Image: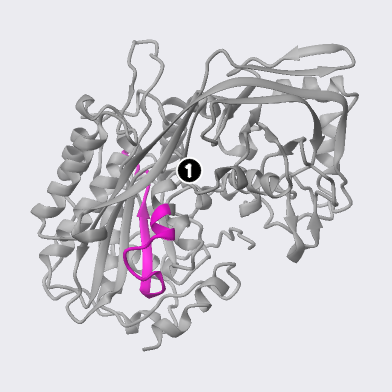
Amino acid sequence: MTLRLRPQLILPALVLSGLFSIFPAAPAAARDRTDPARLSDITRELASDPYAGRAPGGPGEAKTLAYLEAAFRKLGLEPAGPGGSFLQPVPLIRTQLASDGRFAVSGPKGETVLASGRDISVISLLPVDRVTVQDAPMVFVGYGVTAPERRWDDYKGVDLRGKVAVFLINDPDFEATAADAVAGQFGGRAATYYARWTYKFEEAVRRGAIAALIVHQTEGAGYGWSTVIASAGEGYDVARPRPEAERLPLQGWLSADASARLFSAAGLDLAALRQKARSADFRPVELKGMRFRADVGVAHSRFDSHNVIARLPGRSRPDETVMVAAHWDAYGEGPPDAQGRRIRPGAIDDALGVAGVLETARLLARERRPERSVLFALWTAEERGLLGSEHFGANPTVPLERMAANLTLDILQTAGPARDVVLVGAGQSELDDLLAEAARRQKRTVTPDARPERALFFRADHFSLARRGVPALLLMGLGGGADLVQGGRAAGDAWVTAYTDGCYHKTCDAWSADWDLRGAAADVDLVVDVAGRLANSRQWPDWQPDSEFRSLREKSASARRR
């Protein structure tokens, strides 16, 4: 399956080719609007210390679930989990590498110890007591991409059994120039799914590798080394019948400095290899004489976390659904920061998104019941790899083939009103047009993700539904700075930079009385508008003809014809 982003310019006033004539107008009475004070109050509660950073299976989960279930009950919504419950159990495993683990590479000039956190950051997703790797050969496999439809194979039949795969992050034309033959072959600067570390590790498993390491690069990854090491050796996965067949004993990252040193010790120029990897003629390169060693204990446990799912039942077509979703989890407690704070409260990421879902539910529940059902989903374990939404995708409580759309809120900006809304994954589906029309009613425009190379479209929970064919729309403040009423695009970019560099996944992602949530409230209003119109429509928005998801949706087309 090929996944790619195609940013497009979306004009303030679109020629809609009759699309919106098929969607009902808003009710005669003006809709209530999202209340910024409610967004603030919900976020402040969920980001408070008693919730302990809302880690899946952590000390704050029970309190979080109780709060969310009570909120849905108060709105008069029905439970939409299995067995008449608001909760869908998500079986997870948690692994934690021992802090005294040893990682090293031996070579012609002796042994180089790789310091955990400085040179290397790895996890294991296998429920074993210890991982030991003895003198495994290391093979550089470029970007680690096998894409027959693009006539691309970085592996060229290399046998990786018992070996360590070393990759570059992103995909082959991420750094391409006009002179490179690959330029544009993988969507240009817009990342494809081949760019994601999840794909690369899955491909390494298929190739028989014993471990896999990605050379870190901040621009290509979309985040710095501090984000990579935030896991501190902790891993999560859904519980699997045969995890050894689907997961590597060790997977993770090499820092840029450590990578350069190791390649140099093997007599290789990493910069030159990076350029060669942009050619379809690239062949894997063994780091001759270099052998990877690892010996680390693994603590592991199995537990159930939970998605929280509620339903506003449709009055005439209840088996058709529109989904509005966010993730409730954050990073729990971690090492103390400079002020001694350990709780990482996840206020903006994503308690504020949860507040947006609850506000959407409140506003839609006040109107006449829609024709279709509206499902409100609050996922667990997004920060651990989209695990809650992935479990739902594999075990849906409603038919996905009769889900009209998934609308996801993940990180809303707190800097005030904006003239536009930033759309991640622009150009993928007809939902873009619905959003543009809703924005026009607010006298706003839609701006595509300014940096699609960061692959944000593959890093939020909507992707678990999109990869199964459900048209999806992602509103995420990290997609680029909004055009703020006060300060314009520069101020919006400054907000994104300050948040991502300063507080993303850290203890300072905390609620603040200084937030201006009018812009966030306006974005939630867009979701209310789109969800409400879809829920009262007979239409099935589709992926665009050139979208890689369209063929997935077409497989279930017969279920939507009746």
Q: Quadrant of residue 383?
A: top left
Q: Is residue 503 above or below residue 350?
A: above
Image coloring type: one colour
Counting labels gives: 1
Q: How far across and down, in percent of the image, does residue 322 sit?
A: 31, 68
Q: How far across and down, in percent of the image, does residue 174 sit?
A: 70, 47
Q: Quadrant of residue 167?
A: top right
Q: How far across and down, in percent of the image, does residue 537 sit?
A: 29, 79
Report crowding for label 1: few under 14, some 14 to 19, many 20 or more residues within 10 A (C-alpha).
Answer: some
Q: Is residue 474 above or below residue 41?
A: below
In the rendered structure, the answer to whether residue 107 lies left or right of residue 33 reads right
Residue 416 shows up from this direction: no
Front-most of 141 and 304? 304
In the rendered structure, the answer to whether residue 434 lies left or right of residue 234 reads left
In the rendered structure, the answer to whether residue 101 lies left or right of residue 227 reads right
Query: Label 1 sits on what residue type?
Result: Gly
Q: Residue furthest bottom?
A: 562
Q: Quadrant of the C terminus?
A: bottom left
Residue drawn 20% across the image and 39% down it? 40
Q: Which residues are magenta?
A: 391-415
In the rendered structure, the answer to whether residue 334 lies left or right of residue 274 reads left
Q: Which residue is mark 1?
A: 385
Residue 522 shows up from this direction: yes
Indicate yes or no whether the magenta region holds residue 139: no
Q: Quadrant of the N terminus?
A: bottom right
Front-most of 221 and 551? 551
Residue drawn 16% across the image and 60% down it? 363
Front-most of 532 and 111? 111
Indicate yes or no whether the magenta region holds residue 412: yes
Local secondary structure at mark 1:
loop
Q: How far across and down, in percent of the image, does residue 265 sit?
A: 85, 19
Residue drawn 26% across the image and 28% down it? 59
